[in-house]
Image (cartoon, rainbow, N blue to C red):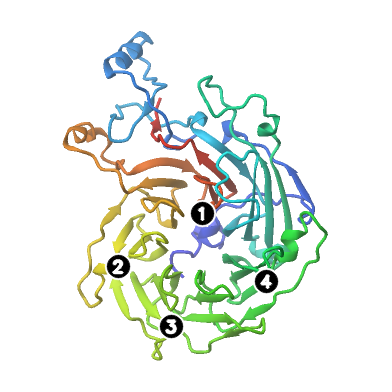
Amino acid sequence: MSKRSADAESGGAPLKGGDRPEPMDIDDNKDMGEFEDEFEDEFESEDEILEAGVDGRPDAEREAEEAAAGGMEVDNGTFIVGRNKLEEGQHLAPDLGTYELLHNLSTPWPCLSFDIVRDGLGDKREKAYPATMYAVAGTQAEASKDKENQLMVMKFSGLSRMERTDDNDSDSDDDDDDEQADPILESRSIPLTSTTNRIRAHQVPSQDPSVPGQTFVATMTESAQVFIHDITPHLTSFDNPGTINKPVSTIRAHKSEGYAMDWSPLFPGGKLLTGDNDGLIYMTTRTDGGGWVTDTRPFQGHTSSVEEIQWSPQEASVFASASSDGTVRVWDIRSKSRKPAITVQVSSVDVNVMSWSRLTTHLLATGDDNGVWSVWDLRQWKGGEEKPTPIASFNYHKDQITSIEWHPTDDSMVAVAAGDNKVTLWDLSVEIDDEESKDTAGVKDMPPQLLFEHIVEHAKEVHWHPQIPGTLVATGTEFSVFRPIPVVYGVAVK
């Protein structure tokens, strides 16, 4: 694998892993205790975080203040993309006041991949603080300590909102002591023998509404094996004692490791696709009796590794795959030939990630090795040699795109993570008229659709929380849980 092979300086570790922190002395099946948010130490680079807020002052007034300060180029205002110019000597700086929620926490080893697990605490928990959420992740221990790898079932609780100092903040409640609760990370672990390349959760609803359904987790490992675990006991064990169980199924069809994996959202019982570095895709289905069967006939067509798989959110028999051969291919599982129905060359380099909009189902977003991410209208895809034109394309990130995901309830919002340590939020509905375009000359490298930028060292994956609006979780060297203040986005400068 070219893009995930280690640099000479990284000691042979997969590129996706990044620099590893020292392992922590933690009992993974006990409360991991409180963690600190040492923001002062975490945000030090020049181009760190795009911030929210509005300055509202005329340029002349701001320039006069700078002159009165003795020529020091300091501006504590807010930079609005597409409206303000970044003057020579100015640079972007974080403003923690633009976050409603921000917590960073570490696990014993970095995690290349994670997934959020829906819970029974309710939907649209926009102002429910302190927040609680559940997730699963797979670790990447040092090569010499493979036996320390684990599948982690995690509970984040006590996630309080940022302290508000604005007296005009109508949402603040000074009498609510719970808002300043101490954040806690608890975890349950399932031992694994190798690094987890990709992990995805699937929840099977119960026939009886009073009884919780099952939660299965598929873990695609560096060993080329895919493990399916029933983690329902681990989730319930946070409140009631449970037992650690072995995989309910192990998929051994792959002869090489892989990173592509997705559960069908339209097959409640469980239908899983997995793709490997040989370009092969296998389908595993849960039977009526509760067992798991892997089709021995792979889907074949890619000429290089399969990097991403996404089931159609609308058609139960259709899925798309992205590859390091630069193509996206659309498949129909009913095809006896196991060949793609449509093949489109979307990039001249590796296509690392892909996301299919669940709201506007003809939209597909892709991200490649050059840091370019694009949005495609599938209605324009006819196949053949002619390459379609993306309806939007952005070359903002300075390193490979490592994750991309549509907002679950807003089909104009997209979250993107990249190897340049940035997680960015985008609004595709933003347009600039002729008058506003006069102010964009100094910010040509910042597209007006760029709303917010957050720093996660060695960013690998980002997911919107489906039940806590506007809240995201990202993983890299550590986990970052954050929510920008809603509605207004901008960029702080100093």
* Mark 4, residue position: 229
- Tell me the crowding category of disc 4: few under 14, some 14 to 19, or many 20 or more residues within 10 angstroms, Cα based: many
Query: Alpha carbon of mark 3 to alpha carbon of mark 4: how far?
Result: 25 Å
**Residue 327 on image: x %, y %:** 33, 71
Q: Residue at point 57% right, 31% down?
A: 40
Quarter of the rendering containing residue 344: bottom left
Q: Nearer the viewer, residue 84 or 47?
A: 84
Q: Residues within 10 Å of mark 2 (few under 14, many from 20)?
A: some
Under mark 3, the amino acid is Ile
Q: Nearer the viewer, mark 3 or mark 4?
A: 3
- Compared with 182, 65 (above or below) is above
* Disc on res. 463: 1
Q: What secondary structure is found at the residue carrying circle 2?
A: helix
How many marks on residues? 4
* Type of the residue with mark 4: His
Q: Residue furthest bottom?
A: 336
Question: What mark, if any, has residue 333 been given in the picture?
Answer: 3
4 or 1: tag closer to the N-terminus: 4
- Numbered disc 4: secondary structure: strand
Residue at 65% x, 71% y is 207
Residue 295 higher or lower than 222, as above or below? below
Is 201 above or below relative to 284? above
The C terminus, quarter of image = top left
Q: Which of the marked residues, 3 or 2, is nearer the chain's N terminus? A: 3
Q: Which residue is mark 2?
A: 378
